[in-house]
Image (cartoon, helix red, strand yellow):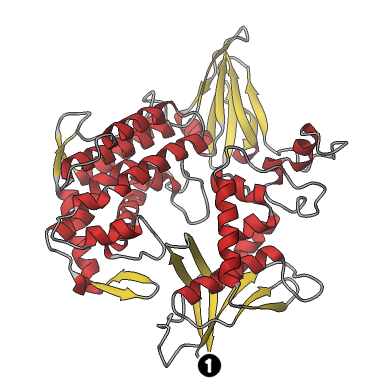
């Protein structure tokens, strides 16, 4: 995000704080250009290792004290030094240098390498569009410069409103978020410019579909929406060309069509034959998933804490659970989820046996992902992956696409719906397995490899975690909704089917599994 911050503080705010994103041709081409580098290869050596590989690809680094995480496209090793190289699909400046935002990004990578113990003298940007590589010397002042940028970015992220758009700046037309940012229109309304310019955002291709012929049927075949009257097809549209479906009077919409429309975020609106608004439908509630997650976090802490919890902590989580129910927008819901997660993980260490040092180590680092700095974070990440893996298979088996979510944004290779459904099970399965593995003595220091860049499980350690995870899935619980005994494995399948029923309008809303 430092690159975005230097490029445009408003862009940084929209992406980092508001979680807003939009693709354009440039971002898509950039993703394609990165395919060649987005595969790990070449071992990352220890800083003092004598024999080093020439290159390491996709190196993940994190520094808790700086509050900075990076995945470096490539690190070149030569003569005892390591040089980060970042790949950009576009053109560099005409003078052969690098753009300020790119310089900040690669300099931050160099600082992370230095703080990890590596000797770094220079950092490079490879501009694929202009076929040249630009170099920046990494001086003693580099860390001070990066710390100042981080401080400025944090200050802006704490603001309740985004910074104003850039004014008459050539960076705006090629920005993928211009249709969301509306720089010219916003500046005009803020009296920062005299006349509004032509709107940058193109007119959307999708259009509403109106169905008013009585007795018509709306169904889906493949990727097309089909409207028929008395058995004859009267209209066809590609699903991607449909922004909403408006049905008037006695018109039938099949459950398959509802599901296909909801998956792409298209709403269905019902009007009476006389034209009165009767209602509308949308995908199942995101709020229920987060409410279930926060509820289960609260229960897990109350059950397993080995020491007394702060007196107001349980009430704070209960209040956030209630707020999640009424959150109207995704950014607001994500903010509630993030606050609950901070509270929950601030006390996560209390669930480990006092005789163990792993809980204290986790408390020192907090929840961190890539790369995990301690054994607890390592096992958490692995068990989360196991959980999502199972949910992907289950969602496919009930006829849902695991890559089209209602809360997590759909991105290439990201099983968004599986991540959505995993929210309420993270505490009940993944985090419970992690706690049990350490408290029961199943995992010890011999099951981890500690590296300068993070901690990872050994082969035997992974097997132990998998065995514990499978045991947890076979554990029985009384289902809080249906009041019969099921295994957690069966509960995953049940919740996926409840979600599918909510998608097809068999149920009014999705009901999460909330333990007692």
Image position of 90 with respect to 428: above or below: below
Residue 248 screen position, x and y as percent: 59, 15
Q: Is residue 204 above or below residue 31?
A: above
Frontmost residue, 186 versus 505: 186
Can residue 21 be seen in this snapshot?
no
Work out which quarter of the rendered image holds the N terminus and state it. bottom right
Which residue is at the far top?
274
* 157 in relation to 54, above or below: above
| Of residues 381 and 220, the one drawn nearer to the viewer in this rendering | 381
Q: Position of residue 95 (x, y in %)?
A: 81, 75
Vertical placement of residue 220 versus 49, above or below: above
Q: Secondary structure at mark 1?
A: loop
Q: Which residue does the numbered mark 1 point to in the structure image?
A: 79
Residue sitting at x 69%, y 78%: 133
Asked if one can make out residue 303 in the rendered structure from this viewpoint, the answer is yes
Point 53% across, 30% down: residue = 219
For residue 182, side relative to residue 314 (left or right) = right
Instruction: Give the percent coordinates (x, y) of residue 221.
Output: 53, 38
Residue 44 lies in quadrant: bottom left
Q: Residue 474 at x, y = what percent?
A: 15, 49
Pick the quarter of the image with the C terminus.
Answer: top left
In the rendered image, which quarter is residue 74 located in? bottom right
Left/right of residue 74 with respect to residue 402 in the rendered view: right
Left or right: residue 261 compared with residue 446: right
The mark total stands at 1
How packed is label 1: few (under 14 Cα within 10 Å), some, or many (20 or more)?
few
153 relative to 164 in the view: left or right:
left
């Amino acid at each position: 995000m430092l690159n975005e911050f230097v490029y445009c503080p408003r862009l940084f705010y929209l992406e980092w704080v508001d979680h807003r994103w939009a693709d354009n041709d440039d971002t898509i081409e950039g993703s394609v250009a990165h395919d060649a580098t987005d595969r790990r290869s070449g071992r990352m050596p220890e800083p003092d290792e004598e024999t080093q590989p020439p290159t390491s690809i996709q190196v993940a680094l994190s520094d808790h004290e700086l509050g900075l995480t990076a995945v470096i496209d490539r690190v070149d090793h030569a003569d005892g030094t390591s040089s980060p190289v970042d790949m950009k699909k576009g053109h560099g400046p005409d003078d052969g240098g690098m753009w300020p935002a790119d310089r900040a990004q690669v300099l931050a990578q160099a600082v992370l390498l230095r703080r990890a113990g590596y000797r770094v003298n220079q950092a490079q940007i490879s501009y694929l569009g202009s076929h040249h590589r630009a170099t920046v010397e990494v001086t003693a002042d580099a860390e001070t410069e990066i710390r100042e940028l981080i401080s400025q970015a944090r200050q802006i992220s704490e603001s309740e409103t985004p910074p104003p758009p850039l004014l008459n700046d050539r960076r705006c037309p090629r920005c993928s978020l211009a249709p969301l940012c509306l720089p010219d229109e916003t500046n005009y309304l803020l009296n920062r410019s005299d006349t509004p310019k032509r709107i940058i955002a193109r007119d959307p291709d999708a259009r509403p579909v109106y169905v008013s012929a009585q007795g018509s049927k709306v169904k889906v075949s493949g990727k097309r929406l089909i409207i028929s009257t008395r058995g004859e097809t009267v209209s066809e549209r590609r699903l991607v060309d449909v922004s909403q479906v408006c049905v008037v009077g006695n018109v039938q919409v099949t459950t398959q069509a509802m599901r296909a429309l909801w998956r792409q975020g298209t709403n269905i609106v019902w009007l009476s034959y006389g034209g009165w608004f009767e209602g509308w439908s949308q995908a199942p509630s995101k709020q229920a998933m987060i409410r279930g997650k926060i509820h289960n976090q609260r229960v897990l802490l109350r059950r397993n804490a080995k020491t007394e919890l702060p007196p107001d902590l349980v009430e704070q989580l209960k209040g956030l659970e209630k707020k999640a129910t009424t959150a109207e927008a995704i950014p607001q819901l994500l903010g509630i989820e993030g606050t609950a997660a901070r509270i929950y993980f601030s006390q996560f260490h209390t669930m480990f046996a006092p005789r163990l040092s792993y809980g204290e180590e986790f408390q020192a680092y907090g929840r961190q992902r890539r790369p995990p700095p301690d054994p607890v974070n390592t096992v958490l990440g692995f068990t989360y992956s196991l959980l999502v893996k199972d949910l992907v298979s289950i969602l496919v088996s009930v006829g849902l696409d695991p890559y089209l979510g209602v809360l997590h944004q759909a991105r290439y290779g990201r099983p968004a719906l599986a991540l959505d459904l995993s929210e309420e099970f993270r505490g009940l399965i993944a985090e419970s397995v992690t706690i049990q593995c350490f408290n029961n003595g199943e995992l010890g220091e011999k099951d981890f490899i500690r590296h300068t860049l993070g901690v990872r499980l050994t082969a035997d350690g992974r097997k132990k975690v998998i065995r514990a995870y499978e045991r947890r899935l076979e554990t029985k619980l009384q289902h809080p909704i249906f009041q019969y005994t099921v295994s957690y494995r069966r509960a995953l399948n049940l919740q996926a089917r409840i979600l599918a029923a909510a998608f097809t309008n068999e149920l009014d809303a999705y009901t999460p599994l909330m333990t007692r």
